[in-house]
């Protein structure tokens, strides 16, 4: 076991306990954790071991229930204030909510300007697709770098991979309509998202808890972004209908200005809303996961039946295989978000059995797809698309097999739920590494075709 690994696990369990109090915001939890770590360090300096230092620090920090009640008294308006657009004021001028709102809006506009400029300067649609993520994600990472107050060294460490990816995507001589260019466009956002995750966790990527926080943030961001998109779509539809009545054509303005600014800008605004209103969405997350998990299990079983009646594995349509890969990725995202929304201290229950059923169903689908892919490669030969899909499905197979094994151990009460969490978060960088291989190594290996 790595040094202090058990201490970090105890701190993670303590943090999970404190986070269950609605009266304590994530920022307050971070502050309490900092105080706890300071107390532990002070005790370790006196010669105590990790366990003794943790127990003494907890007692010096104060009774957790008392802390929760104290926060509830001091911040009695916190729960309804979370529904207001701008969060509570802070005594720290640097953390002023209005200043943060100004930074968010500036970055959102910056992302829109970058996308608008990209469409103006890049004539090739395929090149624009490869660069689209590079025009948006740096602004999202910049928000978290500002929010987490990253050091100059950490910012420089993030800029280097962003720049290296930009060089590869724009200097490689991709063949027009080639497979490697499309693969690079599809896999680059995975790398960019994980780099944004490094900024989100404040550079503490080695922390299992921080990585799980990023998983939770990703799910909540998807919820907020969807809500913003639906609301924006309704407003745009009403505007278009109204202007048509008076004979005005709103479509050019929509295509040339509103969408290029609104789509990327909404991503930054949604990220800010998640940061400001985390507790509101966390009340919805368990409900969503409990609704969609059994539905997804049923969907996977139907897909298995479809694959079983599709004939020989070599005859399975390539489009169907691509759609199945997309479905497996969505299933993995649901699994991760379900785990992030679960109380790690709760005993095994029916929902954990459903999660295991989800993993087993996904494993069955993945096994069928791997068989079909290997059959097609043996009969028709390999290609960049086939090798990329095969690699992804092998990664999913390892991920799901281990997840199923740990889930069974948890259900049998032989493993803590933290073991399930750790496996999920520690495997995430593997997907980033594979995406980097596809983007950087595949084009020269396959001759940029």
Image (tube, rainbow, N blue to C red):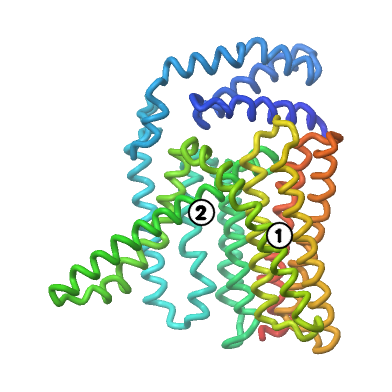
What residue would you read off at disc 2? Answer: 222
Mark 2 falls on what kind of element?
helix
Residue at 81%, 87% (x, y): give it: 381
Residue at 41%, 20% in the rendered image:
75
From the top left corner, tell me how far across and down residue 38 is, in percent: 64, 20
At horizontal 51% and vertical 27% (from top left) the residue drawn is: 22
Work out whether residue 130 or residue 370 is closer to the camera in this orientation and state it: 370
Q: Is residue 321 left or right of residue 66?
A: right
Q: Does residue 94 appear in this view?
A: no
Q: Is residue 232 shown left or right of residue 395? A: left
Q: Position of residue 116 (x, y in %)?
A: 36, 69
* Residue underneath mark 1: 431
Query: Where's residue 283, x and y in %?
Result: 52, 37
Foreground residue, 165 or 418?
418
Report if the CB atoms under discs 2 and 1 are less than 8 Å apart. Answer: no
Q: Residues within 10 Å of mark 1 (few under 14, many from 20)?
A: some
Name the residue at 84% across, 81% down.
375
């Amino acid at each position: 076991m790595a040094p202090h690994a058990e201490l970090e696990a105890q701190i993670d369990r303590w943090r999970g306990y404190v986070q269950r109090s609605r009266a304590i915001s994530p920022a307050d939890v971070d502050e309490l954790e900092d105080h706890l770590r300071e107390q532990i360090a002070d005790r370790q300096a006196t010669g105590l071991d990790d366990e003794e230092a943790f127990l003494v620090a907890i007692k010096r920090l104060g009774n957790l229930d008392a802390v929760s009640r104290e926060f509830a008294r001091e911040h009695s308006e916190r729960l309804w204030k979370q529904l207001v657009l701008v969060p509570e004021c802070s005594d720290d001028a640097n953390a002023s909510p209005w200043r943060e709102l100004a930074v968010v809006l500036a970055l959102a506009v910056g992302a829109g300007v970058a996308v608008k400029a990209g469409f103006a300067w890049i004539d090739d649609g395929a090149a624009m697709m490869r660069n689209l993520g590079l025009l948006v994600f740096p602004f999202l990472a910049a928000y978290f770098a500002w929010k987490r107050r990253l050091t100059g060294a950490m910012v420089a460490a993030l800029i280097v991979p962003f720049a290296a990816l930009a060089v590869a995507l724009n200097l490689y001589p991709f063949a027009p309509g080639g497979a490697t260019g499309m693969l690079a466009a599809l896999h680059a956002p995975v790398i960019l998202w994980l780099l944004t995750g490094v900024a989100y966790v404040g550079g503490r990527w080695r922390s299992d808890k921080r990585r799980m926080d990023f998983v939770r943030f990703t799910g909540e961001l998807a919820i907020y972004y969807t809500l913003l998109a639906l609301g924006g779509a309704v407003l745009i539809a009403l505007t278009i209908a109204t202007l048509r009545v008076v004979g005005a054509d709103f479509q050019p303005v929509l295509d040339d200005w509103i969408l290029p600014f609104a789509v990327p800008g909404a991503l930054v605004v949604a990220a800010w809303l998640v940061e400001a209103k985390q507790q509101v969405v966390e009340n919805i997350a368990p409900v969503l996961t409990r609704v969609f998990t059994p539905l997804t299990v049923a969907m996977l079983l139907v897909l298995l039946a479809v694959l079983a009646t599709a004939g020989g594995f070599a005859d399975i349509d390539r489009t169907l295989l691509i759609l199945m890969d997309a479905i497996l990725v969505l299933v993995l995202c649901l699994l991760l978000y379900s785990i992030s929304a679960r109380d790690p201290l709760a005993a095994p229950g029916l929902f954990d059995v459903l999660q295991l059923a989800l993993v087993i169903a996904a494993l069955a689908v993945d096994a069928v797809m791997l068989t079909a892919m290997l059959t097609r490669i043996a009969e028709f030969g390999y290609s960049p698309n086939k090798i990329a899909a095969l690699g992804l499905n092998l990664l999913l197979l390892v991920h799901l097999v281990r997840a199923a094994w740990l889930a069974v151990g948890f259900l049998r009460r032989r493993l803590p739920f933290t073991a399930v969490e750790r496996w999920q978060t520690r495997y995430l960088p593997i997907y980033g590494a594979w995406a980097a291989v596809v983007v950087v190594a595949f084009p020269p290996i396959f001759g940029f075709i």
